[in-house]
Amino acid sequence: MSKPLRTPVLLAALLLGAALPAQAQTMLTLGISAAPASVDPHFNQGTSTQTLTYNVFDTLTDRRPDGAVAPGLALSWKPIDDHTWELRLRPDVRFSDGTPFTAEDVAFTFARLPNVPNATASYAGQIRSIRRVEIVDPLTLRLHTEAPTPSLPVDLSVVGIVSHSIGATAATEDYNSLKAAIGTGPFVLRRFSPGIEAELTRNEAWWGPKPDWDRVTFRYIPNPGARSAALLSGSVDIIDLPSPNDLPRFRTDPKISVYSAQGWRLVYLAPNQSAAVAPMITGHDGQPLAENPLRDRRVRQALSIAINREGLAERVMQNTATPAGQFLPPGLFAHNPDIAVPANDPDAAKKLLAEAGYPDGFRMVLPVSQNARPTDPIAAQAIAQMWTRIGVQTTIETMPLSVYSPRSARMEFPISMWGWASPGHAGHPLISVIASNDRAKLTGSFNRSGYSNPALDALIQRAVTTLDDTQREALQRQAVAEAMTDVAIIPLYQLTNSWATRRGVTYEASGYDYTRATLAHQGR
């Protein structure tokens, strides 16, 4: 026979304890506009991929939301001489499989960057000047550069570090299967369904401040209306790239908060200047043109000034973008205040076409990704109408980013629409977007126009290797001016970054437009 409980107090205590649930896990669900090209952190230097990989793989230096450079896996960095940087690494860091992080992993990562097969937007340009990595000890390394590289600490903020013990025998497919998706970051990737969702759990051994969330789910919702509906219904906690149509309503809804910051991303057009006969360009009779008209600067100028950028920013983008004539917004290193936004002048555009030998214009297709940014197809449609008015009859062809990106890299389009965000200085896009595509020199890794100007290449090299800050900024401003004068690309607008959250969740808006779960907080 069992003994009775001695006191009512003890009975109450036991009953209360039995009724208490285990501590609930904190969960964050994000509605993300574009699915990543890969889990491989070196495969594609694009927002959609970085939104996933930067939550899993740390970088040596970190970019704060306000743009400041801060320690990441590297605790400190200093120049030893004009051609050498010494980095001291953070101790007691481990990859999510338990192996220790050391200088050997950094050396392996740098060796891997230029050699990722079929990479659609390589990170090689960020380490192009490094000619030798010297491992002093497991937590100290020296980066020996071919030329002075004053921007190297900034450039390293975009390179995710991978494990040499896992990566030595891993291909991109092994990252996608999660076999090699081993990082030191704040979260561990547990499941990845391409184009559908990714599930992560908090890395309890992470060296940084403990994230608010035990579990994080990225749901890929390319349709902006569906993304807004998911937020309003409560099925997601945060969405990126809220539709400009919905932002006014979100800002007045007490259950929704909007967080915005001036973005560092320029949306631009890259006219194909490498093809002798341009693909997807014909005369009005439908026959291919004997020569590529986009090789003529006057034609590129005509296309540029036919665009009403103010109209795009105000009406198409609904004031979520700022008209641009260069890569950087004011406030970033080497923004050139002397470069004006190209004025809209259709009559002058027609005269330029006539001078170039196309008085009646021609026909052209403007391909655009349907899911890189939800506003790209709408903006492209408006641009097509503007070009048609000057005689360049333009039609739009949309396709998924997974198809668009490799085709653009193979120069299969007459012109393509892209976005590029600098980590804080003009040398970054000058090297990657404007400089000639040269695999040996690791320049032009995202040159989608085929533009090549040896004199400008030489100026860019000087502009990124000059140690004096004032002189370097002046040279970068000069290089930007020459590239824009030559219409190497056609800048359109700089984006305002926005995130919308449900009540009870906040987000630290940043100049970079990828989304980090560590910047989301509960109850603040």
Image (cartoon, grey):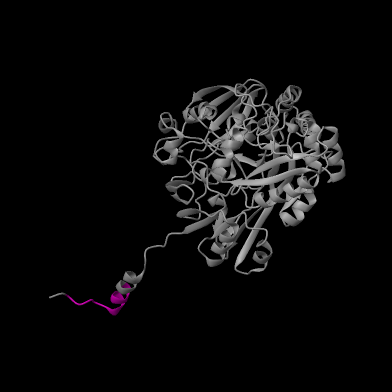
At a point 72% along the width and 55% down the height, the residue shown is 316
Residue farthest to the front? 285
Q: Is residue 280 above or below residue 11?
A: above
Note whether 320 is above or below 132 in the view shown.
below
Query: Could you tell me how many numbered marks the image carries?
Result: 0
Q: Nearer the viewer, residue 7 or 315?
A: 315
Q: Quadrant of residue 449?
A: top right
Q: Position of residue 333 (x, y in %)?
A: 74, 37
234 is within the stretch colored magenta? no
Q: Closer to the camera, 302 or 421?
A: 302
Q: Residue 216 or 448: which is nearer the viewer?
A: 448
Q: Please, is residue 12 above or below residue 113 in the view?
A: below
4 vs 25, left or right, is left
Closer to the camera in the image, 88 or 203? 203
**Residue 94 in sight here:** no
For the point 79% across and 43% down, which residue is it? 391
Instruction: Give yes or no for residue 4 being in the magenta stretch.
Output: yes
User: Percent position (x, y) of residue 100?
Assistant: 42, 35
Position of residue 109 relative to residue 490, above or below, is above
Task: Indicate the quadrant containing the N terminus: top left, top right, bottom left or bottom right.
Answer: bottom left
The residue lying furthest to the bottom in this view is 8
Quadrant location, the C terminus: bottom right
- Report whether residue 358 is seen: yes
Residue 95's quadrant in the figure? Answer: top left
> Where does residue 262 sit, x and y in percent of width and height?
70, 50
- Tell me the quarter of the picture where residue 293 sits: top right
Q: Which residues are magenta?
A: 3-13
The percent position of residue 190, horizontal first and vertical second, equals 41, 48
